[in-house]
Amino acid sequence: MIGTYLLKKSDLPKFIDALLPEYEVVGPKLIEGEPIFDYLKSGSDFVDSYTLLSPKEFLYPQTEEMLSYKKNNGEFIFSYSLDEKKRIIMGVKPCDVRGFQRIDPVLKEDPYYMSRRNNTLIFAFTCVTPCENGFCRNLGGPTLDKGFDLQFTDLGEEYLIEVGSERGKEIVEKTKDYLSPASDAHLKQKSSIVSDVISKLPDIKVNGVHELISWDDPIFKELGEKCISCGACNFACPSCFCYNVADYTLPVGGYRERTWDSCLLAGFARMAADNPRESEESRMRQRISHKFKYYYEVYNAQLCTGCGRCYAVCPVKIDLRDVLKHFWEVKK
């Protein structure tokens, strides 16, 4: 850690306002009574709250134009642009930061994603209370030790701010009028808060589960019969990264567009000759195996971050906590 500071909670709006002239600042704000990540127009917009949807779309938009072209005097002229705006995403929970970290190695050669990633600062917020559906206890827990520029922890009247990067150190310098040094006592207070949250989270075993998942496990048929293939779980997930690309022709040119896709949608794996995942069972096998087996075998990390959003948005209440428990029970 590069440094630790204190910020009075009453000064947080001023802290944010000091950054707005130079950065686009994204954070949770109330929209029709619900906390949703959006652009902040002032520091008073920000609410420190759990959100049903992650801020993934600000690094990896649901829909984005990749390139466009026009025909001029018989020649095609292509153009594309990268989003290089200086941006801060604040109020990001640890599970969402880990979602970014899971996407990073997959899209590390993607210029669109990496341009946003490299130009975005991450202000993480420690979870000081367990969320209703979360099970991150064995998937990283309610705080971070890396992957952030600044990390805020609510200590009651103040936020403890931990600096995790040189860019975070620059932010501290810009906002030093609102900050004061933190002490070891404040770090111990944070540690006590985190330990309390961990003790209240369900102890869902994850380590080693990739070795327990078999192709013919009956759980996939059971879940497939229940799933309605709406894709809500994928779209709410902070670490899902699948997409589709489509080309559109206009009278004077056209454009190429990328949109999020879902492995649970019926047409996800369809090819010219066939659809190898036509059944709900096969698509559920892919989703669960990708989360807890295939990704791990490549990147040595679980693709799931334990946020519980998939359960929160699922119309038929498929619960990954129950799925993980099943794999361990089968082992017995």
Image (tube, grey):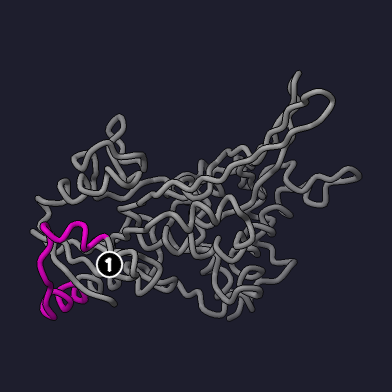
Quarter of the image holding residue 240? Answer: bottom right
Image coordinates of residue 216 in percent, x first then y, are 74, 66
Secondary structure category for the residue under label 1: helix
Picture quadrant where residue 331 is located:
bottom right
Residue shown at 72% from the left, 45% from the top: 268
Q: Is residue 116 left or right of residue 1?
A: right
Q: Which residue is mark 1?
A: 169
- In the image, residue 232 sits, relative to residue 184, either above or below, namely above
Q: Amino acid at mark 1?
A: Lys
Q: Residue at position x 36%, y 39% from top?
A: 38
- Tell me residue 232's x, y (percent): 54, 43
Magenta region: 171-192
Q: State yes or no: residue 83 in magenta.
A: no
Relative side of 113 to 67, left or right: left
Q: Quadrant of residue 170?
A: bottom left
Q: Is residue 236 visible?
A: yes
Q: Position of residue 332 (x, y in %)?
A: 58, 81
Q: Is residue 321 visible?
A: no
